[in-house]
Image (spheres, grey):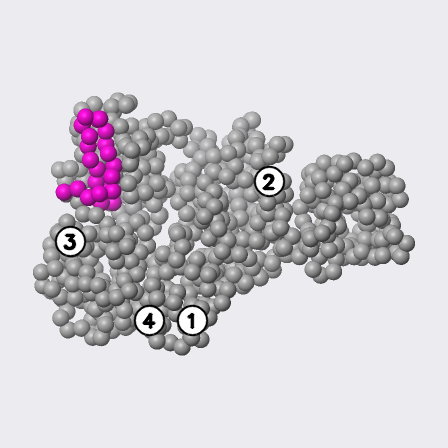
């Protein structure tokens, strides 16, 4: 991502106030040898606009250049790049928030260069945004190209390499006066002030740097185990720096910048201000290049997290040890943040000097730590490649858009393809705005998801609403947001909400997920920890963010083996054809013993138990003639002594709909397998035949005309 950030600074360096709109093809942008071309929502190339000597790009193109989600909050006139942090207030002019920090955009001469809106499109000043990320470029006049590289220029500092300082203890010494950064009076309390002082208590002047990626670090005091912190995420210059329990927030995250003279500077992520040493106290201030903002790092020794994997407590975890290793040390977006919190926790408890049992207990507690915005993912890859068409548009002057709130709406009838031939997803997209970009972006976003996830959705509703909330149930998605969101952001939110939909349609026994949470012993997110439904939805978002990356998916399955099994089982239940590879997960989840079971006809007299299609919910029939695989069944034993019957053609099982106990109720095929209305007792008649009695009703599988039903008398069957 860092290399792409260079794009933003480069435009301002090379463009001059010539034509108002850059002509196509005049300037090439080359990133590590690969040309870059930004595009709009329709895939059409976009180019810079030069206004009053300042170069601007549409907000969507800026998002592409950064590799980050971009969203708009009309209530406060704010463009969010990256995490939508902070609480801006409304202003007449458009603001830019980068990971919660409000940018003051300036041109090359220091004059204001505010964003502007033209024909409904928001344009951002590329130089100012690029400089906010500390990126630089080179200009190749001969090739008429901007060359984006990761190396420093003569004018810019660069982020420190994580290999230089990650996971190590340093003394942080102010340039010039040669005084160390320490905690006032060696305090271990929250809120204690950070000072520069020649008088140091114990090892309060030693700091562990734990990389969070992209040049950012958590900085943790060795004596207290607490992180550098800006109280209440204050963004004002002059605010004193303190220490506080690690929480992974932007106010505890600093970018470590290596200066040209070999010193280091520290920029707080939430405010963009620099850690600055005064005559005694340390504050955050605007950058000024003074010695108060430059420090040398004096290596002490490796940090605690580099020693944990070789500690007695780690080995005492048994089979949990590798799960913890994956959780804290993997190349997953949240691992570094959780690792930093673990470092603070273990350092505060003097982990290395504890007995083995106390060490093990602390590490088990670390498995429940969660990162700030743990599963807020910037991108959900396209799993489906589905296409769609809007077949009709209706207008309704009074439509219930949310719990009795009536509004005029436009109803778009949508027909979307599935993942295997014959699958069709039909639903409506309802919008209170006839021409909102939310219509197209929402449809594009949901089309990324597999048919198994979205097939239950019959209605998506968008309403311009200050609630700023996404909600979903078994068949509906409600988007009540102020302004609009782009396709990427909608997809990220849908990955959570469609998890709720899958849960309500396919989970079956809700306690199964509870048991998976307990067995995994590792948290998915702080939000998900509140209850099982949110935990499942958060896992859904995490799962679909890595589904297209086999290595990261394997890590997620290692960290959350039980959740992974249950989630895959639900996907199989939803679409056993597309997710046929998850059959074993489904059987294991359902307690089905699949080994050695072959497909055979199930007959009563001369009638074959059969199905006529592969649709979940279709009635099961009996026929005097066998119909290939439609008349083949696998009668699987379960771990609790029952049997379930799966059809070989459809992959669906016998089911009594609605858990009915009615005599004569018709049998259907269903995407289940672990419900009491699917489990049957096999009763041997002693003459080569048997009866099948449903667990939930006590009634028997029987023949009634051409239909299979449940009955008090039952039929005799052979297999």
Give the quarter of the figure containing the N terminus: top left
Q: Nearer the viewer, mark 1 or mark 2?
A: 1
The quadrant where residue 54 appears = top left
Is 213 situated left or right of 638 in this image?
Answer: left
Q: Quick one: which residue is furthest to the bottom in this view?
A: 355
- The residue at 16%/51% (across/down) is 259
Residue drawn at x 26%, y 52% is: 161
Per the image, the residue denoted by label 2 is 578
Circle 4 or circle 2, nearest the eye: 2
Secondary structure at badge 1 equals: helix
Mark 1 or mark 2: which comes first in sequence? 1
Q: CA distance from mark 4 to mark 1?
A: 16 Å
Instruction: Give the CA distance from mark 4 to mark 2.
Output: 49 Å
* Magenta segment boundaries in residue numbering: 129-154
In this rendering, position of residue 8 left or right of residue 296 = right
For label 1, count other residues whose C-alpha is less than 10 Å away and answer few (under 14), some (14-19) or many (20+): many
**Mark 4 vs 1, N-terminal side:** 1
Residue 262 badge: 3
Query: Who's the residue at 69% across and 52% down the image?
Result: 594
Judged from the image, the secondary structure of the residue bearing numbered disc 2 is loop
Residue at the spot of label 1? 313
Which of the two labelled residues, at mark 3 and mark 1, occupies the earlier sequence position? Answer: 3
């Amino acid at each position: 991502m860092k290399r792409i950030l260079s794009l933003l600074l480069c435009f301002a360096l090379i463009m001059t106030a010539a034509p108002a709109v850059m002509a196509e093809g005049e300037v090439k942008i080359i990133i590590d040898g690969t040309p870059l071309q930004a595009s709009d929502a329709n895939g059409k190339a976009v180019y810079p606009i030069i206004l009053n000597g300042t170069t601007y790009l549409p907000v969507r193109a800026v998002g592409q250049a950064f590799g980050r989600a971009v969203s708009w909050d009309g209530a406060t006139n704010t463009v969010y790049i990256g995490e939508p942090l902070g609480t801006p207030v409304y202003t007449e002019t458009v603001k830019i928030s980068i990971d919660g920090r409000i940018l003051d955009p300036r041109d090359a001469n220091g004059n204001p260069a505010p964003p502007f809106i033209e024909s409904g499109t928001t344009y951002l000043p590329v130089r100012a945004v690029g400089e906010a990320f500390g990126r630089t470029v080179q200009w190749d006049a001969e090739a008429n190209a901007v060359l984006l590289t990761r190396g420093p220029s003569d004018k810019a500092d660069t982020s420190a390499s994580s290999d230089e300082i990650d996971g190590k203890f340093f003394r942080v010494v102010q340039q010039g006066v040669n005084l160390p950064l320490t905690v006032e009076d060696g305090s271990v309390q929250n809120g204690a002030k950070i000072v520069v002082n020649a008088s140091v208590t114990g090892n309060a002047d030693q700091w562990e740097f734990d990389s969070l990626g992209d040049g950012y670090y958590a900085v943790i005091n060795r004596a207290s185990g607490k992180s550098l912190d800006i109280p209440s995420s204050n963004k004002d210059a002059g605010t004193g720096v303190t220490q506080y329990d690690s929480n992974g927030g932007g106010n505890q995250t600093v970018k470590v910048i290596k200066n040209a003279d070999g010193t280091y500077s520290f920029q707080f992520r939430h405010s963009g201000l620099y850690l600055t040493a005064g005559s005694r106290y340390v504050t955050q201030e605007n950058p000024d290049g003074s010695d108060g903002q430059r420090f040398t790092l004096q290596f002490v020794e490796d940090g605690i997290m580099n020693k944990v994997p070789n500690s007695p407590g780690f080995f005492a975890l048994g089979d949990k040890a590798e799960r913890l290793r994956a959780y804290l040390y993997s190349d997953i977006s949240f691992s570094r943040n959780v690792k930093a919190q673990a470092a603070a926790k273990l350092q505060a408890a003097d982990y290395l000097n504890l007995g083995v049992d106390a060490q093990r207990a602390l590490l088990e507690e670390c498995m429940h730590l969660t990162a700030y915005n743990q599963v807020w993912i910037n991108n959900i890859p396209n799993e489906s490649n589905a296409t769609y068409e809007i077949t009709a548009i209706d207008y309704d002057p009074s439509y219930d858009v949310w719990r009795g709130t009536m509004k005029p709406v436009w109803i778009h009838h949508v027909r979307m393809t599935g993942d295997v031939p014959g699958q069709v997803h039909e639903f409506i997209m309802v919008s209170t705005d006839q021409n909102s970009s939310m219509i197209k972006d929402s449809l594009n976003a949901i089309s990324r998801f597999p048919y198994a996830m979205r097939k239950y959705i019959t209605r998506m509703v968008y309403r311009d609403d200050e609630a700023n909330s996404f909600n979903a149930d078994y068949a509906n998605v409600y988007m009540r947001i102020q302004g609009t969101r782009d396709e990427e952001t909608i997809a990220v939110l849908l990955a959570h909400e469609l998890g709720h939909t899958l849960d309500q349609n396919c989970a079956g026994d809700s306690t199964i997920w509870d048991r998976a949470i307990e067995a995994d012993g590792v948290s998915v997110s702080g939000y998900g920890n509140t209850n099982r439904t949110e935990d499942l939805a958060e896992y859904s978002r995490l799962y679909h963010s890595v589904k297209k990356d086999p290595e990261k998916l394997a890590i997620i399955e290692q960290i959350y083996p039980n959740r992974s099994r249950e989630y895959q089982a639900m996907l199989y239940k939803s679409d056993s054809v597309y997710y046929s590879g998850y059959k074993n997960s489904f059987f294991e989840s359902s307690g089905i013993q699949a080994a050695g079971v072959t497909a055979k006809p199930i007959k009563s007299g001369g009638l074959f138990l059969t199905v006529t299609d592969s649709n979940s919910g279709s009635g099961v029939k009996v026929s005097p003639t066998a119909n290939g695989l439609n008349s083949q069944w696998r009668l699987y034993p379960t771990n609790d002594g029952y049997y379930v019957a799966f059809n070989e053609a459809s992959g669906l099982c016998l089911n009594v709909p609605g858990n009915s106990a009615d005599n004569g109720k018709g049998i259907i095929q269903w995407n289940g397998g672990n419900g009491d209305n699917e489990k049957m007792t096999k009763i041997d008649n002693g003459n080569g035949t048997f009866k099948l009695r449903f667990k939930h009703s006590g009634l028997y599988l029987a023949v009634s005309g051409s239909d299979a039903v449940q009955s008090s008398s039952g039929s005799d069957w052979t297999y």
